[in-house]
Amino acid sequence: MTFNYDVIVVGAGHAGNEAACAAANLGSRTLLITMDMNKVGQMSCNPAVGGIAKGQIVREIDALGGQMGIITDLTAIQFRMLNRSKGPAMWSPRSQSDRHKFVDEWFNTLTKTPNLSIWQDTVLELIVENQTVIGVKTLLGALFHAKSVILTNGTFLNGLLHVGKTQFAGGRISEPASFGITEQLKLFGFTSQRMKTGTPMRIDGKTIDFSKTQEQKGDTDFHKFSYLNNVNRRLKQISCWITYTNERTHEILKSSLSESPLYNGQIKSIGPRYCPSIETKIITFADKTSHQLFLEPEGENSNEYYVNGFSSSLPFQVQIDAIKSVAGLENVHIFRPGYAIEYDFFDPTQLKHTLETKIIKNLFFAGQINGTTGYEEAAGQGLIAGINAHLKCDGNDAFVLNRNESYIGVLIDDLVTKGVDEPYRMFTSRAEYRILLRQDNADMRLTEKSYKIGLASADRYLQLQNKRDSQKSLLSFIRKYSIKPAEINSFLELHNSSPLAQGCKLAELVARPQFGIAELASAVPELQTEISKITEQPEELIESVDILLKYQGYIEREQLIADKLQRLEHIILKDRIDYNSIHTLSTEARQKLSRINPDTIGQAARIPGISPSDINILLVLLGR
């Protein structure tokens, strides 16, 4: 018997869940297929969401009507805004989550989503006719047909785990790998490679001597991930703890490097440069006598701790000996050792910006199958794939975010234009317009776009409109309100700021670095009255206005640059030129342009190896 759907999503990790919810909430009859319904949204590695640049992605997911920000807030046991000592373009929210409640919240969300069904099974192969995917076949013999299929297989495709010399198949510890899909896709002409990632050991908090470690408390202010007024942290907030490796730790690790799969040739795949194993750290940074470790709680009522910074695939006895040499962990009990995992991924230059594959129509890839690492990168891709899978079913225009609009746009453009030579991780440095792409304004940038296609709810859009109105009103008041020296000089002197010699607009004072709008309101009753008119999330709104006024010049300058370069994105290039016949192009340019077939001149200019002279040749050929 065959079952029919509009969209099928394979895999219920962070990419798959967002994809399934997006497609279903847009109105597609959606089926989510997972090996284990009890592990949807599993946090395979650390029990945390967000971080540098990753937090911006989560806020964008929320602004678009996705689920990760909401679920993270509801299950948070610690929240911190990272990089507060730097400018607001660098501020990045991060949250520790209760691992088990995170899964429970995802399960509740999925089961309550209209148009969404779940099937527990393993997909063995795709059903493809005339280079178009029309469904999947499963281990139980079920046939599911659909107009679009999204693969979000994570680390399960031919997954192989390593602990010392011990190797065994698996997608995660104690979970089976998936076989067959890679081999089938290769027959259709897809290029596949292997990547490697790893995770640290888990330890028992009852056996940690916290008196020898440094406490790291979370923030207690208004910041969170979701822009929705009715979503807030509700669990008990718990501290993380910091300790350090030492020379004895490093001696133990170095003496066993011959048993490390990373160094004895057992693992040959590409590993992450920016999240290295502890054995890689002691080799790469041989001059350092210690490395920082974070002991991160896994739950509100759990004694399990994640040892962030101690990823390893060494034999478990070596891991045990090494961790027990660390201050505070001398008598620690280990629940399970760290391990490395190798898995298949596909060259993401084989994708369109919609995340549909170029080789098979209506087939989409999202998450680690595209060579990325991280829950947030996966979720962002899943959301875009789910939206476009739905739109493709109905024959509607694609939904694509540009680099000047979102970190998600930067992520996807990097993948499909440049490909990957290591697991891709988002950083603020990858975004050339990061002053525009701040975490505080993701809703201003993206919610209306999502509302227009039907994903962001009417309530969310109404909240955005109210926020815009309040922001406009407060900005107008501050820019117009004049203040005299006698009214404010005592306040300025108290905050070590130069007193006024003559009156000025309030906006000039807000632009000073020593204080913000909230502090000024204590000295300017009229400003306090204006602020009292804000009924929804006043602290977040005040912060956003503060940023707009303090960094106005930088924001305007970057917007001008973005607008200028954006013109290249409107010059359509796709399928207009036979690159191999243009011998004035360099050989490398002909090869890469033919393989990637960029949509626009702007995308072509970002392909590694394409020179400005190559771009000029293309512009001449297009009559520009």
Image: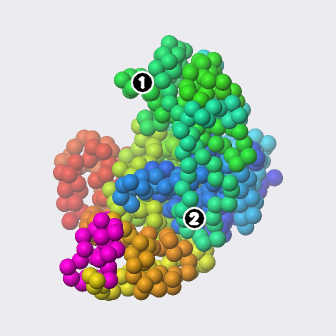
Q: Secondary structure at mark 1?
A: loop
Residue 490: within the magenta? yes
Q: Which residue lies under the disc numbered 1?
A: 289
- The crowd level at tag 2 (other Cα within 10 Å; few <14, some 14-19, many 20+) is many
> Residue 226 got which mark?
2
**Vertical side of 101 occupied by 338: above or below:** above
Give 269 or 187, whichever is nearer the viewer: 269
Residue 518 in which image quadrant: bottom left
Give 201 or 305, whichever is nearer the viewer: 305
**In the image, what residue occupies the spot 69% across and 46% down?**
299
Residue 469: within the magenta? no
Q: Position of residue 71 (x, y in %)?
A: 64, 58
Residue 339 in which image quadrant: top right
Residue 23 in which image quadrant: bottom right
Residues drawn in magenta: 487-513
- The crowd level at tag 1 (other Cα within 10 Å; few <14, some 14-19, many 20+) is some
Q: Secondary structure at mark 2?
A: loop
Q: Position of residue 79 (x, y in %)?
A: 56, 54
**In the image, what residue occupies the spot 44% across and 69% down?**
543
**Vertical side of 466 occupied by 260: above or below:** above
The residue under label 1 is which amino acid type?
Thr
**In the image, what residue occupies the spot 22% across and 60% down?**
619
